[in-house]
Image (tube, helix red, strand yellow):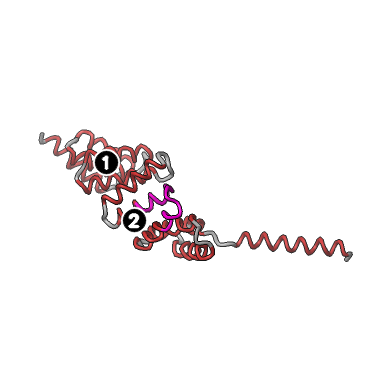
Amino acid sequence: MSNVRRAVAVLLLATAGTVVFAQVKPDALAEYRLGNFERAIQICQEEITADPGSLESYVVACWSFLRLGRYGEALRSARTARSLSRYDARVAEILGEVYYYQGNNSEALQYFQEYVNLAPSGQRIENVYYFIGEIYIRMGKYRHADIALSTAVHWMPGNAVWWTRLAFARENAGDLTEAVSAYEKAIALNPQLPDARRGLDRTRQALANR
């Protein structure tokens, strides 16, 4: 083999090795999307060790902690991410979820409202309005809940559970006709949803007794 051919062969082998390395590099976001949350966290932690300023690694780690119900770890990571990027909408949403699941309604509401201000048509906007609606239901503010949940189903009209929660908010606000309509929508989407069926029967009975 001539020297030129030998040099070309070595270069091709080196390039191929680089491509293979790039292909097998761990991808935390891909693992998260596959539901491999522990693996995603492990990759993120390795990335953070190599680069403590890696905002993306903190965000994916937080998402994974949330899905595993490890809210304390999610909160610590989110606070660090917040120090790296004060106005990142994803971090605001993560903090809202953490506080929601911890039962801290006022803190959760603050961060969800911040998300709405930062990303009014963001990728998580429908979920944010759903969480806001649930918080208002917890607080007994059913008309506020109606507004938030109506917005949630505007963004995601095929979610039967959310229509049921909207109907429940309307029922408790005394808007029985509108509640019946929302329960019927939920049942049309999922005829086997027991909460929607019970709610529809209950609300129709209340209307009949007026």
Amino acid carrying mark 1 in the image: Leu
Looking at the image, residue 209 lies above or below residue 139: above
Task: In the rendered view, tell whether residue 154 sits above or below residue 135.
Answer: above
Q: Which residue is mark 1?
A: 166
**Picture coordinates of residue 174 (x, y %)?**
17, 37
Of residue 137 and residue 175, the one placed in the foreground of this image is 137
Q: Is residue 122 visible?
A: yes
Judge the density around disc 2: few (<14), some (14-19), many (≥20) Cα neighbours within 10 Å.
Answer: many
User: How many numbered marks have been drawn onto this rendered protein structure?
Assistant: 2
What residue sits 10% from the left and 34% below the top?
210
Q: Position of residue 132 (x, y in %)?
A: 30, 45
The N terminus is located in which quarter? bottom right
- Magenta part, dominant SS: helix
> Could you tell which of marks 2 and 1 lies nearer the N-terminus?
2
Q: Residue at x 26, y 54 (%)?
A: 104
Asked if residue 53 lies in the magenta stretch, the reply is no
Magenta stretch in the rendered image: 80-95
Q: Is residue 183 visible?
A: no
Q: Is residue 127 left or right of residue 205?
A: right
Q: Is residue 92 magenta?
A: yes
Q: Is residue 93 left or right of residue 49?
A: left
For label 2, the SS is helix
Height in image: 11 above or below 126?
below
Please provide percent x and percent y for residue 105.
Answer: 26, 51
Numbered tag placed on residue 111 in the rendering: none
Could you say which quadrant of the image residue 148 lies in? Answer: top left
Secondary structure under the numbered disc 1 in the rendered image: helix
